[in-house]
Amino acid sequence: MDLFERCYAFTRADEVKAQGLYPYFHPIQENEGPVVTIGGRKVIMAGSNNYLGLTTHPKVKEAAIAAIRKYGTGCSGSRYLTGTLDLHIELEERLARFLGYEAVLLFSTGFQTALGTIAGLVQKGDYVISDRENHASIVTGALIAKGMGAEFVRYRHNDMEDLERVLVRLPEGANKLVVSDGVFSVTGEIVDLPRLLEIAHRYGARVLIDDAHAIGVIGVGGRGTASFFGLTEQTDLTMGTFSKTFASLGGFVAGPERVINYLKHHSAALIFSASPTPASCAAALAALEILEQQPELVDRLIRNAAKMRQGFRELGFHTLDGQTAIVPVIVGDVETALLFWRKLFDAGVYVNTFIPPGVPPNMSMLRTSYMATHEDEHLERILEVFARVGKELGLLTPEARERIAAGLAQNHWGQVPASEQRQP
């Protein structure tokens, strides 16, 4: 078989496009935060990861422009060689202080951060232990490590008993790294970090938490999952991204200075990639400063998400318990999800559509996410449109609700560990 044969045989996306139901790759022509322009018309954005609404903040934009004027548009080299700017060092030091860690190391993207951290630390004979619903970047990093001779094992989603079942079977003296999303990107659930840390450390494993969807969202002043539980000192490593709360592009890992120093000299993803651009670093620095000065933005974000979570439930939709910016609405089969998305879009509301294999069969969803800059008028309009379309598609009948509830129970979604209720 020719390598390209499967490419020419792939027609599913073309078929969905022909039906007018394709929910991906729609270009945004103008971004004003909670309202964007797509296809020449204004649409309420309820699918962005721009959690604090800072991508259009004047201070963030001006910082990026000023950095271009001073440093140019790129670094023309890797951090290891000619690509380190004083901006990189400043951002690393500021982030370390903000998060409560000894040191931070920047990467050029969030995806690359997971690859570079996992494959940079884990070697032949070591073990990576991963939640089954971790982000694709974690899975890819673990598979790279596996290709270098490490072992890659998974445990059931947010199931700490299953994590212990996995760990107890591993060699006692082997190096182990347990990796989990802090806030899971599909469902918005929070990892049961107290139990994870207790079990992992009991079996001699280190812990890496991916806070891509947690920083700026949960924890004291938006400091993430470890802060949310008051466990920063016990959490070995935290990684994150700049493409969400920090209104930019890039990623970072935070941890002990000796570990960060090791990664500087052993992470191929860092050594062989061009460093984050001056504009990206300056924008992230400005966003961090705003977050430090205005922690009330985090409160407003969570208030908006809580309003929507309650609103969807009152309308009769199935969503999941949570305390984050992500509020998924479960609709069931793929065809219904695609049609629902199209009707929302036509009515001026943009959300994200998740279908298998990204979610379990018959658990297709519309993942909504919120910003601190959403006004009540935006939120009320989203609920109004959801109510009309949900009724039109028959999703609010007792039969439909029972069917979706059965799927949620089967997949153990929406079961919040009691430890998640504790926030300092």
Image: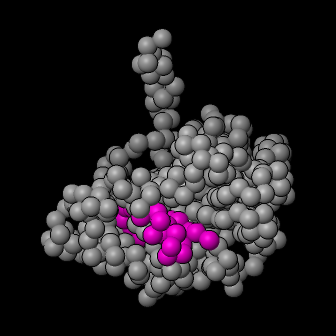
In the figure, is residue 140 to the left or right of 323? Answer: left
Where is the C terminus found, in terms of image quarters? bottom right
Q: Name the image quarter holding residue 276.
A: bottom left
Vertical order, 273 against 357 (above or below): below
Q: Is residue 249 magenta?
A: yes
In the figure, is residue 195 to the left or right of 344? Answer: right
* Residue 89 percent location from the top left of the image: 34, 76
Name the residue at 45% across, 69% down.
261
Name the residue at 14% across, 71% down.
69
* Residue 51 percent location from the top left of the image: 49, 68
Q: Residue furthest top?
A: 1
* Residue 15 percent location from the top left of the image: 49, 24
Vertical order, 116 against 7 (above or below): below
In the figure, is residue 98 to the left or right of 178? Answer: left
Q: Name the image quarter holding residue 334.
A: top right
The region drawn magenta spans 236-264
* Residue 25 percent location from the top left of the image: 41, 42
